[in-house]
Amino acid sequence: MLERQERLATVMTLEQGKPIAEARGEIVYAAGFLNWFAGEAERVYGMTIPASAAHKRILVLRQPVGVAALITPWNFPTAMLTRKLGPALAAGCTVVCKPAEQTPLSALELGRLFVEAGAPAGVVNILSMHAPQPFADAVFNDQRVRKISFTGSTEVGKQLLARSAEQVKRVSLELGGNAPLIVFADADIERAVAGAVAAKFRNAGQTCVCANRIFVHRQVYPEFSAQLQAAVARLHVGSGLDPATSIGPLIDQAALEKVQRHVSDAQQLGARVLSGGGAAAVAGGTDLFWQPTLLADAAPDMLVSSEETFGPVAPLIAFDSEEAVLAQANATQYGLAAYVFTSDIGRIFRMAEGLEYGIIGVNDGLPSAPQAPFGGVKESGLGREGGPTGIDEYLNIKYVALSL
Ligand code: SIN
């Protein structure tokens, strides 16, 4: 993958739209999952446990669950595939992958590399298709498929969870988010602005861990919003293949309409547009570009605060106390990622422990890494991907009772 980084990144940018520098970064990130789990494959240890009866022995084995069906999204077409493929193969499972309908080519390019690298036929199967239903029917009705791993919307995740009950299949779900990003008065404002730009505008705001609500302490609200506005003004909207671009197009018309709906709802309910606020015209491009948008005076009852926008829109909400912002941040059915910017060590621990989220970025707008467990609580998902526990999602535990 690293040798073919340029080709893989170019295919990704052409089909998904993200800036080429981000696509190159995604290839390195994606290869990192294969590298990490290649290491973990050597550590699928068992256990012996002392028994209370002298003539008995207890052995614990960890074995592959069986065929795994991997359903991946369009926003990170390569990394979300290797984040599932790496642990599945390391555990000893064969896989059937269904990439998102919008981005099949990145997955097929990766499949080509598996063939070239000598993966045995039938171990990595990648099926591109126009509609997901036949794939879902096939994998849910087949007893050989013992595991479903899905990254996508909470709505679809719930349907897959319900269907997995039919044959009691193992299921991992990485679903939607509504991440709060909280800037306290004692934060390093420059760092908080850089963190907010990374957490909000990466991939044009189309990540599950994107900052969706930016809470700013009233004392630093003017300084933070002015600095963020200046940073947003430096973002360049354009073709992903243009090296100057930092914001590419949205994935489709439905995505653009959602962003439009959220921005006009916020304006109607009293938010002020500090930057952007509308579609962006890009010469020779599609009509799917949206200007990076900064909204002041946002409030919790607006769509931008209560639903995942999945676009380059940053709503700023003022707060006065730690207790109040913690309650507001947790007032959502989602629990994937949260971000905190502060220099107070006590507050770091209080917030990290009090925030009901699976991932907490502390003074860090980009917490994702192959070595770290990624996943959410509440309606953001089940299970963890990456990190030392990622392989457990593809292993069954077997207990052998031995009587001597
Ligand atoms: C996602 O949006 O699902 C993944 C983002 C990441 O890995 O950072």
Image (cartoon, rainbow, N blue to C red):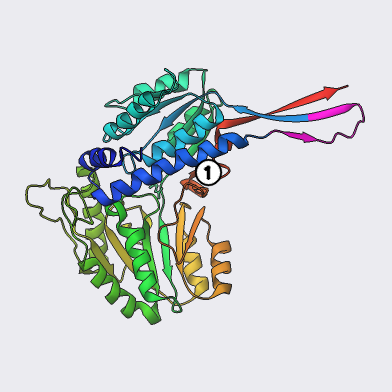
Which corner quadrant of the image does residue 122 belong to? top left
**Residue found at the far bottom of this picture:** 219
Locate residue 390, reporting x and y percent: 54, 40
Is 198 displayed left or right of 383 in the figure?
left
Q: Which residues are magenta?
A: 46-58
Locate residue 119, reporting x and y percent: 43, 23
In the rendered image, the vertical position of residue 271 relative to residue 91, given as above or below:
below
In the rendered image, the vertical position of residue 274 relative to residue 12, given as above or below:
below
Locate residue 50, reporting x and y percent: 84, 36
- Indicate yes or no whether the magenta region holds residue 78: no
**Residue found at the far right of this picture:** 54
- Of residue 340 and residue 213, the one placed in the foreground of this image is 340
- Of residue 184 and residue 113, the one placed in the foreground of this image is 113
Q: Which residue is mark 1?
A: 384
In the rendered image, the vertical position of residue 230 relative to residue 300, given as above or below:
below
Is 7 displayed left or right of 40 in the figure?
left
